[in-house]
Image: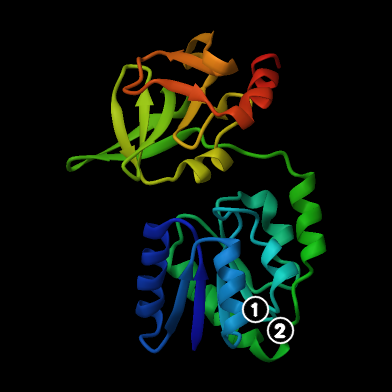
Amino acid sequence: MNTIIIEDENLTAQRLEGMLKKYDSNIKVLATLPSVAESVDWLRKHDAPDLVFMDIHLEDDLCFKIFELAPLTSPVIFTTAYDEYMIKAFKVNSIDYLLKPVNLLELMAALDKYKALKEQFSKPDFDTLLQYIGQREPEYKTRFMITVGNKIRSIETADIAYFYSDEKITFMVTKEGQHLPIDFSLDKLATLLDPKQFFRISRQYLVGFSAIQAVLTHFKGKLKLDLAPKAKHEVFVSGDRITDFKDWLGR
């Protein structure tokens, strides 16, 4: 069986591929694709795989955009962070959904279901899926798991001041002043965090409202932020985000 994994979290994709091999060593993962754009490009250039594993939120958009731009008729098993409220959505003509972190036994059951339904599979009703998603109140992350040395820590989102990217590594800064590496891009974090509490001010910084101590006007209308704890770099709001940032501050 040939499959592709559409997933923007590298460790999650690697773990899923490992479990697929445990289920059947003959399963071949043709590609691991982190974004809508790369998935569309791959699907336009290759024959359809037998099965697709697909996360909902990707680097650049919801995964459903793929179906508008590429001829994907393969059955899909969704891997998602949504809770049981979404079961109705993911049972509409799709093969199955797997709640993250993916459980091996649930993965095996989904693959067994795929085999049983293989001859009867029809294209998922994505309009219905989107309707359910649109009706659902979004849920945002309340904690992050961080590995520090050989220890795993749970950090509450309420205890995080801001996030920043440096040398292609993303760091979270706690309100106590700890700078901790985290396995999420700022693009991904922007979809996971409550937009009422966090704002992406630039390519390098995503800040929490409570971390902003002062907003200073700067040369040529730029805005400079004083953050607490103090940032390692000077922190500016990107010019194209100033208007939205001001609106966000005033909500």
Residue occupied by mark 1: 75
Q: Is residue 31 left or right of residue 63?
A: left
Res. 192 image quadrant: top right
> Looking at the picture, how far across and down is residue 44, in whole percent?
63, 80
Tell me if mark 1 has few (under 14), some (14-19) or many (20+) residues whose alpha carbon lies within 10 angstroms of its own: many
Residue 113 appears in the picture as rendered:
no
Vertical relation: 67 (above or below) 220: below
User: Front-most of 71 and 82?
Assistant: 71
Which residue, as the protein is rendered here, is positioned at the far left?
A: 150
For the residues bearing labels 1 and 2, Cβ distance under 8 angstroms? yes
Residue 6 appears in the picture as rendered:
yes
Q: Residue at x 31, y 19 (%)?
A: 177
> Looking at the picture, how far across and down is residue 232, in whole percent?
31, 22
Q: Is residue 18 left or right of residue 112?
A: left
Residue occupied by mark 2: 121
Res. 42 image quadrant: bottom right
Vertical relation: 174 (above or below) 47: above
Query: Which disc number belongs to residue 52?
Result: none
**Mark-to-mark CA distance, 1 and 2:** 7 Å
Q: SS at mark 2?
A: loop
Q: Residue at x 55, y 19 (%)?
A: 222
User: Front-most of 170 and 90?
Assistant: 170
